[in-house]
Image: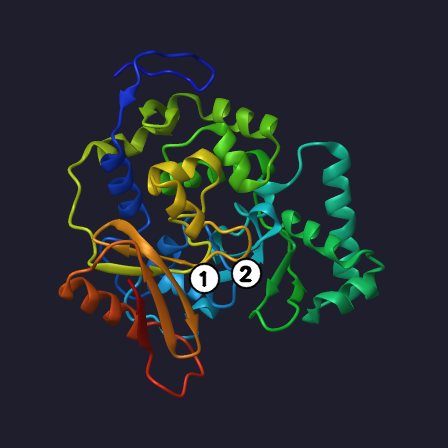
Amino acid sequence: MTEFSAGQVSTARLVLTREQILAFRRRTNELDERLPPGPGSLRRAAWCGLQDSMPRAALLSVHARVAGVGPSAWEDPALVQLWGPRFSVFVVPARDHAVFSLGLLPDDVKGRRRAEDLAARLAAAVGGDRVRYDVAARRAGIHPAFKVRYTSATGTVLIRWEGARQPVVRAVPPPEGEPDAARRELLRRYLHVYGPAAAASFAAWSGISARSCAAAFTALGAALTPVRTPLGDAWILAEDEAAVRAAPGAAAPARLLPSGDAYFLLQGADRELLVPGTARRGALWTPRVWPGALVVGGEVAGTWRRAGPVVKVQTWRALTGAERDAVAAEAESLPLPGLSRRITVSWDE
């Protein structure tokens, strides 16, 4: 088809159905079939980052994508933790951490200098130590302490957060690369995992200014293909067009995706495609802490939460016996540490 840059208006857009889009997203999220164990698979699972703002969320997201995952997989050397998009805690590929830090560095001179100044003060205060977030802020004279998060965009600060206590921070050498190139790569990864998407969706996910997001789209130019979705006009990577057009493969029988998983880390109207019903969207994307998403046969079929060794599942339709068995098997396989009893499922249908 004719190529168009992101700065041009086109009426010759590739028309995509909901089924095509969701099949593509499941495939690029590695949710139809788990990857084999290994550092390469961990990198692919975290290709666009895995939000870790809930205890063990990234671990469970990795488990949904990679076979043979144990309770310590999130600490594998192939992965690191940082404050990523919207200053939320993310687990990202260690070799790509510049993408998720420099790619978020503010464009304006004042914002960039603030981040770099705070990072320099923090590095001087902690040296080679691993220091608790609030202690590091006091040492560096950073007030209020939450401003420590701004240092992450320089790529010189990594964290370790388990959920129960404040994160521990450490200073690292600055990564190689330029912010503009990192931002373009971040956009490419976003479109591969979350696409089709528009600049406004990228801005909502990343926390980058709307102007900077629009500029990143324009910079990719012919690397983008314009599409029309049930929600309106959007873009995909040109290299992903064949995958979007491909016939859907077999969906996994069941997946238990944690709060904030990349498959449903969506905002606004983008949620309508994944979950068409208004009431059901309200049950999945709650005003406070999101539950997990129950995916059965490729469709979100309910929500789940965990209380100790009990996984509480609320379904939106009656499940067959085979579907219930698949959900129970997923629950029993969750790699959660410190449980003295086998995981069981409590059903609310």
Where is residue 224? Give x, y as percent: 38, 25
Q: Nearer the viewer, residue 16 or 39?
A: 16
Task: Residue 65: tell me if it is visible.
Answer: no
Q: Is residue 173 left or right of residue 280?
A: right
The correct choice, above or below, for 277 with respect to 327 in the image is above
Task: Residue 88: tell me if it is visible.
Answer: yes
Residue under label 2: 81
SS type, badge 1: helix
Residue under label 1: 58
- Disc nearer the start of the sequence (2/1): 1
Q: Where's the C terminus, which quadrant?
A: bottom left
* Residue density around tag 1, few if under 14, some if 14–19, many if 20 or more, within 10 Å: many
SS type, badge 2: strand
Where is residue 81? Give x, y as percent: 54, 60
Q: Residue at x 67, y 37 (%)?
A: 106
* Residue density around tag 2, few if under 14, some if 14–19, many if 20 or more, within 10 Å: many
Q: Are marks 2 and 1 in contact (CB under 8 Å)?
A: yes
The correct choice, above or below, for 240 with respect to 34 in the image is above
Q: Is residue 128 left or right of residue 347?
A: right
Q: Amino acid at mark 2?
A: Gln
Q: Nearer the viewer, residue 239 or 212?
A: 212
Q: Where's the N terminus, which quadrant?
A: top left
